[in-house]
Image (tube, helix red, strand yellow):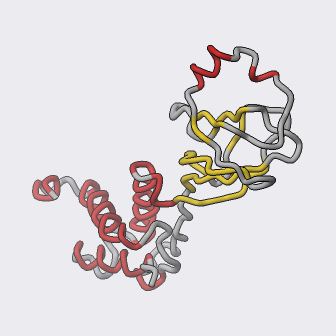
Amino acid sequence: MPITAQSVIQRCVETLQDPTSIRWPVAELVRYLNDGQREVVLHRPDAMRKSAAMALTANSTRQTIPADGLKLIDVVRNTGGTKRAVRQVNREILDAQTPGWHSLAGATEILHFMFDPRDPTAFYVYPPAGASSSVEILYAASPADVIEPASGALYGAVTGNISVPDIYGNALQDYVLFRAYAKDSEYAGNAAR
């Protein structure tokens, strides 16, 4: 059963001992929760992995993952024809062995892909993609934000579930509490929390 955002915020409100949400407004805690979900995906991209059949841009070696993607994880296989597996190779080796590979004619079946973590939303394919090339990819998707309740609302107004897997529920609670205590740093004990 998915963890509701309301239950995470409720636990935070109880830990903060602020049942009327005067010191820490619920909308602010929800913003911290959304930030926490993004932090989870930043450190564990596989937490929000998605599998998708992706039509490739024809006559191009450079491809871009879907708009909701944050980082490519893997290119698994071709989705058409023989459904041949696509293997990751080192681009420098391909550049050295076949310097003009970017200008080759497009092909339906992709043999290799190259990925550079400095450009996490793009990858290259060899040979260049043909008009009907399509591959199955795994990528890290951006988590959906929990909708902030109206100003002055209590935790009961929070709706929806967390986007990351349930196992990260406690980590999200700890992250929200960390951000809340950082706000209230005038009290020396909160810095240690």
Q: Quadrant of the N terminus?
A: bottom left
- In front here: 155 or 81? 81
User: Residue placed at 59% from the left, 25% from the top?
Assistant: 91
Please tell me whether residue 145 is drawn above or below residue 103 in the rendered image: below
Q: Quadrant of the C terminus?
A: bottom left
Q: Residue 18 at x, y = what percent?
A: 27, 76
Judge from the rendering whether residue 83 lies leftward or rightward of residue 177; answer left or right: right
Tally of numbered discs = 0
What's the residue at 71%, 32% (across, down)? 126
Residue 30 point in image, percent of width and height: 44, 68
Farthest-out residue, front: 82
Q: In the rendering, at what x and y percent does residue 108 appear?
A: 83, 43
Q: Residue at x 26, y 58 (%)?
A: 178
**Among the 4 quarters of the image, the one containing residue 4:** bottom left
Question: Would you say 187 lies left or right of 65 here?
Answer: left
Question: What residue is shown at x 53% (from left), y 58% (from top)?
Answer: 49
